[in-house]
Image (spheres, grey):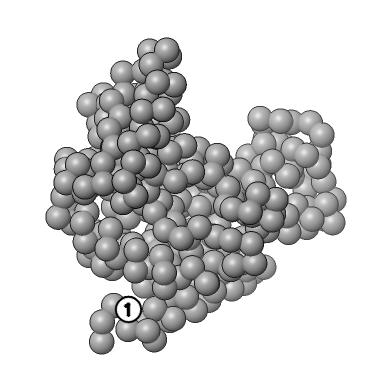
Amino acid sequence: MAQGKKVSIIGAGNVGATICYWLAMRKSCREIVMIDLIEGVAQGKALDISQATSPEGSHTQIRASSEYASIENSDIVVITAGSPRKPGMSRDDLLLINAKITKGIVEQLKTYAPEAIVITVSNPLDAITYVAQKVGNYPRNRVIGMAGILDSSRMETFISEKLGFGYGQVTASVMGGHGDDMVPLPRYSSVNGVALKDLLSHGEIAEIIEKTRHGGAQIVRCMGTSAYYAPANATVKMIEAILSDSHSIFPCATLLEGEYGYCDTVNGVPVVLGKNGIEKIVELPLNEDEQAQFAKSIASVDALLETLHVNHFFGT
């Protein structure tokens, strides 16, 4: 894995701290900085994680601060800060609160880490990615939303559970926004190369799709807060692909500029990740049903963006 690389994490909550832990355990970078405005939170977790990773021979230096100046020279900055999703709260409810938080963070990033690649994790994911893109005036390859890897991993889990075999051999693909209108793609999903339709009935696949779309809400109902292990792992996979310049294909949220027929909106699509962030957007051939589902997902995100514009979030 890349040596001498620096990753900063804004927000030392469950997701941010777990990202830090796994990056250090996997020795994915040389330095990690956690920023949290609540004094002591990031410092305590950094110390705990350092003591956990030391016996593993990790060379990663973990620092914590409440000052943004500490993120200087970061290669990647991950934004996890924001209000968590509570039971009964839709992603729409979070919009204006987390958009304002993200705006303040991005303004700090432009001052202290202007060349960093930005990964957004806060919800509602697609709208927050759009906010970071527009507020920071970044080239689109440098702002990437974490969603599709997480949604795909949930679909893979539900496929394995339904089959009762093939654990670790399932590959699932999910496009679209990170919400109830995401677009699971069974046509592009398989188990060790065997097409999903050859293993499960239409009804069973439909059940898996429905469970995938509501997988996050299910966890919220159980725990009273959002998931963090799976989102953190998905984020780490993105970070490692960028730092290692692996040119791996992952579904991620990005600003569309004509791809799939849409412009000036953010949605989840397959992308190639490398040292420059998004190296390429992959346009899958979609059938009529998949196109209709993707259009619905676009409309759902656009409704959030319209809320931002109506509230003059980006100015007059």
Observer-nearest of 195 and 52 = 52
Instruction: State the image coordinates of residue 280 (x, y, percent, origin top left).
Output: 36, 50
Name the residue type under label 1: Phe
Q: Is residue 100 left or right of residue 270?
A: left
Q: Nearer the viewer, residue 115 or 226?
A: 226
In the image: residue 207, left or right of residue 309 = right
Quadrant occupied by the C terminus: bottom left
Residue 50 position, x and y percent, is 37, 24
Residue nearest the observer in this picture, 108 or 52: 52
Q: Which residue is under mark 1?
A: 313
Residue 158, quarter of the rendered image: top right
- Observer able to see residue 165: yes
Name the residue at 61% across, 43% down. 153
Placement of the N terminus among the 4 image quadrants:
top left
Corner quadrant of residue 139: bottom left
Residue at the outermost front position:
40
- Residue 90 image-quadrant placement: bottom right
Q: Is residue 141 left or right of residue 114?
A: right
Q: Determine whether 301 is above or below 156 in the image.
A: below
**Which residue sits at x=79%, y=31%?**
165
Please report the residue visible at 50 percent of the width from the left and 58 percent of the height from the top: 84
Residue in the image at 36% along x and 28% along y: 47
Residue 44 coordinates in the image, percent (x, y)? 37, 34
